[in-house]
Image (cartoon, helix red, strand yellow):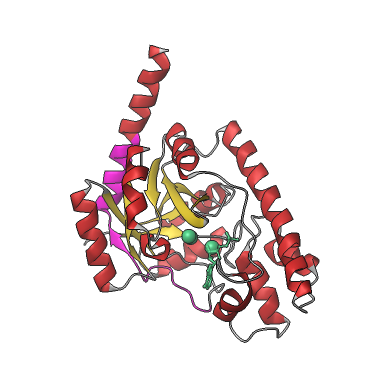
C-alpha cells in the first residue's frame, strides 16, 4: 500500500486549536504514515507529538515555520528535519515569541483607534503558552461579534494590507534559511502562491533554499502544476501539506493535502547532506 504524508501541520503551540495528541489521532484516522509538525516560531509541539505517535507507528518529522520579511511582504520559511533541541535556537525562538506578544498589544492599539475595543488578555488566554499570532486575534474578534468570519478579520483589520496590521520582528529570508541550515534542516518556501512573488525565489535559492511547497490547501491544481514546473526548472524539492490549524480556520484540513512518502525520503537525504557539509565546514575552520 502506498504511504502518504502531510508535511505542514500546526498544533496549539502556535495557532492551531489541536493539541499534539489530537493532531496525531486525526493523522491516524486519515491513515497517514508521517506528518511534519511545523509550528510558527515554536518547536514545543514536537516531543509530545513524537510521544503520541509511537502507539500508531506514525513518523513525526521535526519542523518549524519561520516568518521572514522582505519588500514589506511576509515570507514563510519551513524547515524540515531540524535539530529542534539546539539551545541557541530555543533562545532565538523565545525572542521571536516575545516580539509576537508585543505585536498583539500594538495591533490592539490600532484596533482601538478604529473603534474596536479588544482585551489583549483574551488573545493570550486563547494562545496559552504558545506562539501568539493574528489567527488568535482574529478568533477573539469573531468571538466578540466584531466580524462574522475569520477571513473578514484579515480582510478588514489585520491582513497584510489592512489598517491594523503590524509587522513582526524581522528576520530576513537569508537569516531564516541560515538558521534552518545550521540546525541541519532543509529550508523550504511555504505556500509560494500566497507570497505571489516568484521573482524573489532565485535569490532564496542562492541563499540555500532547497525546496518549495508545491501542494497546499490554498493552491489550485493550476498553481500546483505551475510550481511543479518551477521546481523542476530550478532543481528544487517539491513538498506539500495541508497547513492544518485544527478548527482555527473553520474546518479540519489535516490529510486533505497529502504527498507520497518518497518526499520524506528525499528531505531526509537532503538533511543528511546538509549535516555532512556543516560538519565539513566546522572541521575546515
Ligand atoms: P502571524 O504569524 O501572527 O502573522 O499570523 C499568520 C497566520 O495567520 C497564518 O499562518 C495563518 O494561520 C493566519 N492567516 C493569515 N491570513 C489569513 C486569512 N486571510 N484567513 C485566515 N487565516 C489567515
Ligand atoms: Fe498559522
Ligand atoms: Fe504559513
Ligand atoms: Zn503554516
Q: Position of residue 47 (x, y in %)?
A: 55, 47
- Res. 147 image quadrant: bottom right
Q: Is residue 129 visible?
A: no
Q: Which residue is at the front of the view, 210 or 162?
A: 162
Relative side of 44 to 4, left or right: right
- At 46% across and 48% down in the image, what residue appears? 63
- Res. 256 image quadrant: bottom left
79 in the magenta segment: no
- At 31% across and 46% down in the image, what residue appears? 202
Q: Which residue is at the front of the view, 3 or 278?
A: 278
Q: Where is residue 9 in the image (x, y as percent from the top left)?
A: 46, 60
Relative side of 223 to 38, left or right: left
Q: Where is residue 278 in the image (x, y as percent from the top left)?
A: 39, 25
Relative side of 133 to 30, left or right: right
Please report the bounds of the magenta region as a residue range. Answer: 250-271
Q: How many labels does the image show?
A: 0
230 vs 93: above or below: below
Q: Where is residue 58 in the image (x, y as percent from the top left)?
A: 40, 55
Amino acid at each position: 500500500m502506498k504511504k502518504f504524508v502531510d508535511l505542514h501541520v500546526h498544533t496549539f503551540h502556535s495557532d492551531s486549536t489541536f493539541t499534539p495528541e489530537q493532531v496525531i489521532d486525526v493523522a491516524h484516522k486519515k491513515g497517514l504514515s508521517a506528518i511534519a509538525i511545523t509550528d510558527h516560531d515554536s518547536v514545543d509541539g514536537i516531543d509530545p507529538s513524537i510521544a503520541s505517535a509511537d502507539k500508531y507507528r506514525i513518523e513525526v518529522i521535526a519542523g518549524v515555520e519561520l516568518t521572514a520579511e522582505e519588500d514589506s511582504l511576509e515570507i514563510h520559511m519551513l524547515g524540515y528535519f531540524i535539530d529542534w533541541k539546539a539551545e541557541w535556537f530555543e533562545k532565538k525562538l523565545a525572542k521571536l515569541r516575545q516580539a509576537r506578544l508585543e505585536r498583539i498589544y500594538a495591533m490592539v492599539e490600532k484596533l482601538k483607534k478604529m473603534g474596536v475595543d479588544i482585551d489583549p488578555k483574551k488573545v493570550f488566554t486563547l494562545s496559552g503558552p504558545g506562539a501568539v499570532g493574528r489567527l488568535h486575534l482574529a478568533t477573539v474578534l469573531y468571538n466578540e461579534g466584531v466580524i462574522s468570519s475569520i477571513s473578514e478579520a484579515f480582510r478588514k483589520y489585520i491582513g497584510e494590507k489592512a489598517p491594523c496590521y503590524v509587522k513582526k520582528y524581522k528576520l530576513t529570508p537569508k537569516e531564516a534559511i541560515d538558521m534552518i541550515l545550521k540546525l541541519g534542516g532543509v529550508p523550504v518556501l511555504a505556500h509560494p502562491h500566497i507570497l505571489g512573488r516568484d521573482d524573489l525565489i532565485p535569490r532564496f535559492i542562492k541563499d540555500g533554499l532547497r525546496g518549495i511547497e508545491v501542494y497546499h490547501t490554498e493552491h489550485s491544481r493550476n498553481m500546483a502544476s505551475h510550481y511543479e514546473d518551477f521546481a523542476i526548472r530550478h532543481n528544487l524539492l517539491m513538498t506539500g501539506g495541508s497547513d492544518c490549524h485544527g478548527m482555527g480556520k473553520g474546518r479540519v484540513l489535516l490529510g486533505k493535502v497529502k504527498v507520497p512518502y518518497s518526499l520524506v525520503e528525499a528531505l531526509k537525504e537532503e538533511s543528511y547532506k546538509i549535516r555532512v557539509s556543516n560538519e565539513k565546514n566546522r572541521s575546515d575552520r
